Amino acid sequence: MPNIKSAKKRVLVAKVRNDRNKAAKSELKTIIKKARAEGASSEAVLAADIALDKAAGKGYIHKNKAARLKSRLAKSANA
């Protein structure tokens, strides 16, 4: 455990951010699974596209990963 006051704060802040990031990634995965399960539902795919763009913008996932997942969802929806 850190002894310095600022180091103690960094531990607390890191935990809060870690929890927030974990929750956001989990929510994103849920939205993607729902879009895949519903198949050709354009509403679910659109919701997933929006969620992926937001996650990429906030840095939860890389922008190329977001683009790849969006492409795969669109491809499966059009098939």
Image: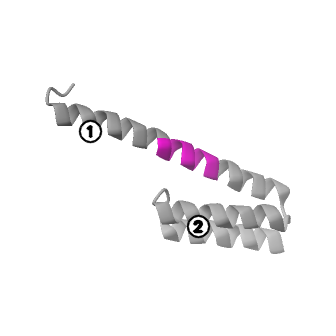
Residue toward you, 17 or 76: 17
Where does the magenta region start and end? 20-28
Kind of element beneath mark 2? helix
Q: Position of residue 27 (x, y in %)?
A: 63, 47
Q: Which residue is mark 1?
A: 10
Vertical position of residue 38 compared to residue 63: above or below: above
User: Is residue 21 located in the magenta-colored stretch of the structure?
Assistant: yes
Q: CA distance from mark 1 to mark 2?
A: 29 Å
| Residue drawn at (41%, 38%) of the image | 16
**Image check: 46 left or right of 4?**
right
Amino acid marked by disc 2: Asp
Vertical position of residue 21 compared to residue 41: above or below: above
| Residue drawn at (59%, 45%) of the image | 26
**Image check: 17 left or right of 32?**
left
Kind of element beneath mark 1? helix
Q: Which residue is mark 2?
A: 53
Q: Quadrant of the C terminus?
A: bottom right
